[in-house]
Image (spheres, grey):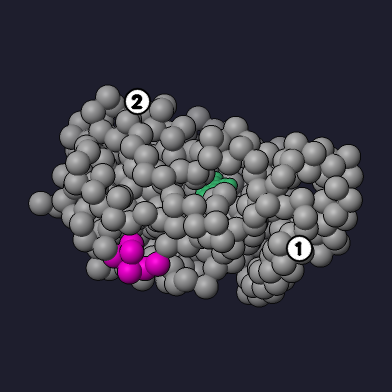
Amino acid sequence: MSVLDLVREDLREFAGYASARRANVTGNIWLNANESPWTNDADKGMNLNRYPEPQPQQLVKRLAALYGVGSASLMITRGSDEGIDLLTRAFCKAGQDGVLIAPPTFGMYAVCARVQNAMVFEVPLIDGETQWQFDLPAVLEKIRQEPIKLVFVCTPANPTGQSVSLDEIRALAKASTDKAIIVVDEAYAEFNETPSATSLLGEFENIVVLRTLSKAYAMAAARVGIVMAQENIIRVLRNICAPYPVPTPCVVQALAGLDDGNIELAKRRAAISVSERSRVYKKLQDMKSVKNVYASQGNYLLARFDDAEKAFQSCLSAGVVIRDMRANPVLQDALRISIGTPEENDALLTALGSL
Ligand SMILES: Cc1ncc(COP(=O)(O)O)c(C=O)c1O
């Protein structure tokens, strides 16, 4: 059995939209895409009158070098949000297949499942009080029992902060061979010491890794997400994707934001976020109004408060906006705090300290 047998049967042979840019033709007068032959006066040399490459090769190569994979194993999407959506559509037959999530977790997994009418199977994280934990035995059991096609492993996990080891991911992939794809969402990998699951891509054809330029690389508004997997999966996702998912101005900015200087800068800033995370963590632990703060490997902390409403309002009145998590049934007293600059973190601590 090939991993392609897990793709929705009706999509296995689907070649997608044959856009003008996909046609393998060359020339110097382009009259095949009903574009304007002129640029406008605001163009800034980007040739915005032309449709972009479906997968801009220069950026693909840059990202492939950054993550240490081959270009054919990587696809650029509109944020990793789109990667999650494409995977759900490619693998889950509406009304029949499902995804597994480990709540409390990033909301888009369930949203994309809902849009695709895929079932959502939940294996809650274990609240270890100092740290949350991925419940590997329960997840393995659920994969055995249910028609699960995608297992979303968020590591470091949003909003809970813990990471999942490569050994656990290996165990998941092994147990899911011929059954399900393990989607390792590493949106916050740059703040974490655990090595990336990209090192497992050669070994397992049922692992997909998601990365993003939205966090440590400081380009959330450019909407650049990255899906990495063995080539056959990438080919399927490219076929079902929108014809031109990556706008030229975003490509230009992403390439500039990934030059050697900016990569160094991103590393230095990630190190600041990590040291600030531990400073804020310790300060929160010492606050009487904080019941519990969880260890985190991301650029955020999840904390439980005696009076979360009061804490939230106190921050708001100081102009500090944090994330209210109380709608989640197991986080009814919890707030998530992104790690800002040292000055921003001081403002947060002052606001909470005044409670
Ligand atoms: C775990 C996780 N995955 C994916 C995303 C989406 O990121 P992107 O901006 O690349 O769509 C987020 C955004 O917050 C996230 O927390």
Q: Is residue 266 left or right of residue 100?
A: right
Q: Is residue 353 left or right of residue 336?
A: right
Q: Write the residue at 27% across / 24% down.
A: 95
Q: Write the residue at 77% across / 55% down.
A: 288
Closer to the camera in the image, 227 or 117: 117
Q: Write the residue at 37% across / 40% down.
A: 122
Residue 267 against residue 110 in the figure, above or below = below
Q: Position of residue 73 (x, y in %)?
A: 35, 60
SS majority, magenta:
helix
> Which is more foreground, mark 1 or mark 2?
1
- Tell whether circle 1 marks a residue whose Cβ is less than 8 angstroms from ligand 1: no
Q: Write the residue at 60% across / 32% down.
A: 327
Q: Which residues are magenta?
A: 165-170
Closer to the camera in the image, 157 or 195: 157
Q: Is residue 318 magenta?
A: no
> What SS does tag 1 mark?
helix
Residue 177 against residue 123 in the figure, above or below = below
Crowd around label 1: few <14 · some 14–19 · many ≥20 (10 Å): some
| Rendered image: mark on residue 117 | 2
Real-space Cα separation, disc 1 to disc 2, in angstroms? 45 Å
Dot 1 amino acid type: Asp
- Mark 1 vs 2, N-terminal side: 2
| Rendered image: mark on residue 286 | 1
